[in-house]
Amino acid sequence: MDSHFLQPVPEVDAPGTDVGIGMVCPFDMALDRELWRWMPWSVSLYFTRTPMPRACTVDVEMVSALGEHGQIADAVRSVLGVRPAAVGYACASGSFVHGLAGATALSDCMRGAGAPAAITTSEALLRALDAMNLRRIAVATPYVASLTDLLCDFLAEAGRAVVSQAGLGYDHDIWTIPYSATADLIRAADSPDADAIFVSCTNLPTYDILSVLEKELGKPVLSANQVTAWATLQDAGVADYTAEPCAAQSLFGRVA
């Protein structure tokens, strides 16, 4: 073979994948790339989706269907072949719609399907609030009012005080909402009585504005994708992420 075509083997290995995390997402999840942004080089994400329902309007009936246990178990099993260290259910509304018991049942279902560790977005939120000792929460959502109310009920059931809330009233195409609208939503939801603001929906882009709004408002601003990424990294045994760019966000800037 002509030596011109021979390429030298690198002396130093390029960053590779040491840990895998499975992500079970709703059928309309459009933000795979955003979840990747919280991942260090050593972690790879393996995405799978639930089937598309007949009705795609984001309301209580539709998000209730997203957590059908048979579909969730099938989705988990579809990524087990690459041996993820943990699996997340990346859907806020689908995991809070039936309260704490519903969220727990979903993570139990994922473990029953073979996930070595499992957590839902809503459970990840509670874990983050506990880790940061945050009790009084402002809620910002893109949802219709009935879904926003159910999120507030979920937090109240978990012993948190929802001191204020704001919603955009979207029932479709949530991933198209621009940062400017989300930033205004967060400002509208804030209250002097709130220890932190939670921005719901894993289909709402938030990565680039979280640290900016934290500086502006002087308190933690947590989002659905952020807490899901943080908690699944913990479950996968990955704690060395404080040097990553996301460390500017208060949740990732603290020691796990």
Image (cartoon, rainbow, N blue to C red):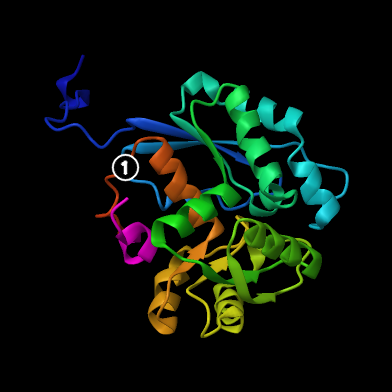
Residue 205 within the magenta-colored segment of the rendering: no
From where the camera sits, is residue 78 visible? no
Residue 153 in picture, x, y percent from top left: 71, 61
Q: Quadrant of residue 158?
A: bottom right
- Residue visible at 42% across and 32% down? 20
The x, y position of residue 49, in whole percent, is 66, 37
Magenta stretch in the rendered image? 246-256
Asked if residue 14 can be seen in this view, the reply is yes
Residue 15 image position (x, y, % from top left):
26, 37
Q: Which residue is mark 1?
A: 41
Q: Is residue 108 left or right of residue 60?
A: left
Q: Amino acid at mark 1?
A: Trp
Q: Is residue 252 left or right of residue 69?
A: left
- Does residue 105 appear left or right of residue 63 in this picture? left
In the image, farthest residue toward the right = 54
Q: Is 254 contained in the magenta span?
A: yes
- In the image, residue 199 sits, relative to residue 35, either above or below, namely below
Mark 1: give few (<14), some (14-19) or many (20+) Cα within 10 Å. some
Pick whichever, 24 or 16, lies toward us: 24
Q: Mostly what secondary structure, the magenta segment?
A: helix
Q: Which of the pair 53/10 is nearer the observer?
A: 53
Q: Give the image location of residue 6, x and y in percent.
A: 19, 23
